[in-house]
Image (cartoon, rainbow, N blue to C red):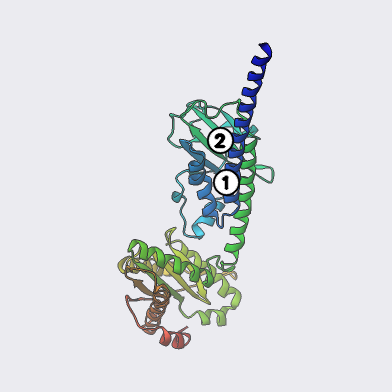
Amino acid sequence: MDLEKENRKLRQQLIEFRREAQRSQVTLERYHARELELMSADSLAELLHILTEGLLTSFGVDAIQVLLTDPDHEIRLLLSSNGISEAAFPHLRFVDDLVSINPRYSRLYSPWLGPFLSPEYDGLFDGVHELKSIAVLPLYCRNQLVGSINLGSMDSRRFTRHHATDFLARLGKICGVCLENTINRERLLISGLTDPLTELHNRRYLDRRLNEELSRASRYHQPLSCLFIDADHFKRINDSFGHQAGDSVLRELASRIRSQLRASDVATRYGGEEFALLLPQTGLSEALLLAERIRMEVASSPIPLDDGSELQLTVSIGVSQTLPMLGKSHHKEVGEHLLASADQALYHAKANGRNRIEHLQSGSSGTKADSQRKLLS
């Protein structure tokens, strides 16, 4: 009788072991799927989406907050270089220092699971105070803590100190490596799309962003405007003061242009002393106001040169606008027309006396401008 009871007990234990093994296998497969998704992210924005919305869904938790250290705003600059605002990631927060959020970060080397204690842990989640248990996954890059993924649950039994953390630790390590690799990849990409002299984007980047902005304008039925800016009499500057002085003038001109722009605006060095700007969600009247602010800012004060002398600079600006579009079948033609119209308007501004603004809402081809613009440099 005792032997039969013992056999039943052993069979029940085997059943429990089998169930536990099956649960572990399912958990392993889920974590493996998350890891593959993280490693396949093509961009920083996609990776951040997976780290926030993606993990929120796959874990089925009540709250998620990803904290990333970004004291020099480098990650945010990489995002803004692609026209993406940090506001696009409501579950992501950039901080200067994690220890200032919670002193426990100073000794956080592995996942931390346990009850949610308010107000001690309030800084780990934005505006969420009803949680019962949390899991904090540290993110390390080259042995340096760079952030954490904070998971929160209304269930006090979801995350406890007694839970194994092997899978979570592995996931945190993979997230850290993916973050570092993606940031490095974005740096390389941006460096290939940036003009080294002015630190604005280059023409290649403009071509890439133009189609994206036209797609967005079409999708949301919004206008898109373009500014072409050209430094007046720039050839005389190079001839009179030398190319080094010309480079200094271009750097200062780029800085003054940049000072008038919004985060969503796209500023590029189109070539030589000419700059092209894309202005999303901007109609013609707003584009003209911005053009005037830039014109006045450039002319507001002389530009100091390395030899101690000063040089007064003015610019001519051409403005064009696309009206809200439907569909995307003609994006290439619309984009070419937008740039050509701004270029044509710039030609008119230079032909009509320089240091002025001209605009075309729906102009003709820029061929004439291309052939005659050099005569007006």
Q: Is residue 99 left or right of residue 352?
A: right
Q: Is residue 303 visible to us here? A: yes
Amino acid bearing label 2? Ser
- Mark sitting on residue 34: 1
Q: Earlier in the sequence, mark 2 or mark 1?
A: 1
In front of the other: 375 or 285: 285
The reply to whether residue 257 is in sight is no
**Image disc number at residue 100:** 2
Q: Is residue 121 above or below residue 213?
A: above
**Three-letter amino acid code of the residue under disc 1:** Arg
* Disc 2 residue crowd, few under 14, some 14–19, many 20+, Cα 10 Å: few
Q: Residue at x 56, y 70 (%)?
A: 248
In the image, is residue 44 above or below residue 319? above
Label 1 secondary element: helix
Q: Nearer the viewer, residue 265 or 158?
A: 158
- Estimate the x, y position of residue 192 in percent, counting from the top left: 60, 67
Q: Which mark is residue 197?
A: none
Q: Is residue 229 left or right of residue 190?
A: left
> Distance of mark 2 from mark 1, alpha carbons?
30 Å
Q: Which residue is farthest left?
A: 285
Under circle 2, the secondary element is loop
Q: Give the residue drawn at x 57%, y 69%.
A: 195
Front residue (pair 131, 243): 131
Q: 40 or 177: which is nearer to us?
A: 40
Residue 344 located left or right of residue 307: left
